[in-house]
Image: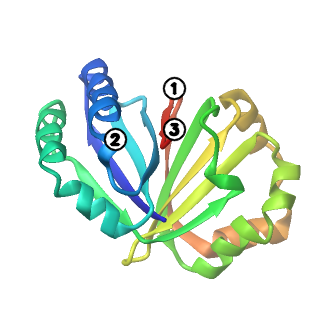
Amino acid sequence: MFIQLITGKCTRQDECRQEGDNWLRDIAPGAPGWLGGTYGFTDDDLFVAVVRFASREDADANARRPEQGEWWGRMEALFDGPVEFHDCDDVTVMMDGGSDAAGFVQVIRGRVTDADSLRAMMTEDAEMLHEARPDILGATLAIEADGTFVETIAFSDEASARRGEQQEMPDDVRQRLEGSMTDVSYLDLHQPWFASHR
């Protein structure tokens, strides 16, 4: 899997959402390898899109389509400033990656210091994590070539996620987490929306 993170300040949120719907209707049916996406706005008007393709080659092929370029020209004009793109080939999926029924999504950014440990926690320890935090519906971990990462965690609802945050984490799990990442920041999507290839 290949994940592209797209972020940019956008106060024209309704128009942005409409252009996203236009993409799903007009562009997505012909987009090679497109798997789906998670979208939303933070409280400070940052648009966040975590878009999934089967491979980087598929994403690049879609970007070269004339209709994609025309659509992006309209979409880019809605942003208040520059738009950032982050491309990740190194992707780990936990519990099918999440759910389109999630009521709250947290996008975590930072830098990995122990990628193998992070991947293991999402795969080998996934069942234990789900038992401790049933509000977590799934996640994806995408690591860029420079060591920065984007983790997208889908929760059943925000209230459950906040209660889960208050739980004491076992010392060994906390130490592994703290030793695996640094420079961590959080983007909360209180009203996320989703799209998946049908």
Closer to us: mark 2 or mark 1?
Answer: 2
Q: Which residue is drawn at the image coordinates 51% and 38% (left, top)?
A: 188
- Picture coordinates of residue 154, whole percent (x, y): 63, 43
Quarter assignment of residue 129: bottom right
Q: Tell me which numbered mark, 2 or 3, is placed earlier along the sequence.
A: 2
- Say few, some or many: other residues with alpha carbon within 10 Å of mark 3 (under 14 / 14 to 19 / 20 or more): some
Q: Secondary structure at mark 2?
A: helix
Q: Secondary structure at mark 3?
A: strand
Check disc 1 and give the amino acid type: Gln
Say above or below: 17 vs 180: above
Q: For the residues marked 2 and 3, what is the alpha-carbon distance in whole angstroms?
A: 26 Å
Check disc 3 and give the amino acid type: Asp
Q: Which residue is mark 3?
A: 188
Q: For the residues marked 2 and 1, what is the alpha-carbon distance in whole angstroms?
A: 22 Å
Q: For the residues marked 1 and 3, what is the alpha-carbon distance in whole angstroms?
A: 9 Å
Quarter assignment of residue 41: top left
Q: Which residue is drawn at the image coordinates 41% and 50% (left, top)?
A: 51
Check disc 2 and give the amino acid type: Ala
* Total count of labels: 3
Q: Which mark is residue 191?
A: 1
Q: Is residue 58 left or right of residue 78?
A: right
Q: Which residue is drawn at the image coordinates 51% and 26% (left, top)?
A: 191
Closer to us: mark 2 or mark 3?
Answer: 2
Q: Is residue 190 left or right of residue 12?
A: right
Q: Secondary structure at mark 1?
A: loop
Quarter assignment of residue 117: bottom right
Q: Is residue 155 left or right of residue 46?
A: right
- Picture coordinates of residue 23, whole percent (x, y): 29, 34
Q: Which residue is mark 2?
A: 28
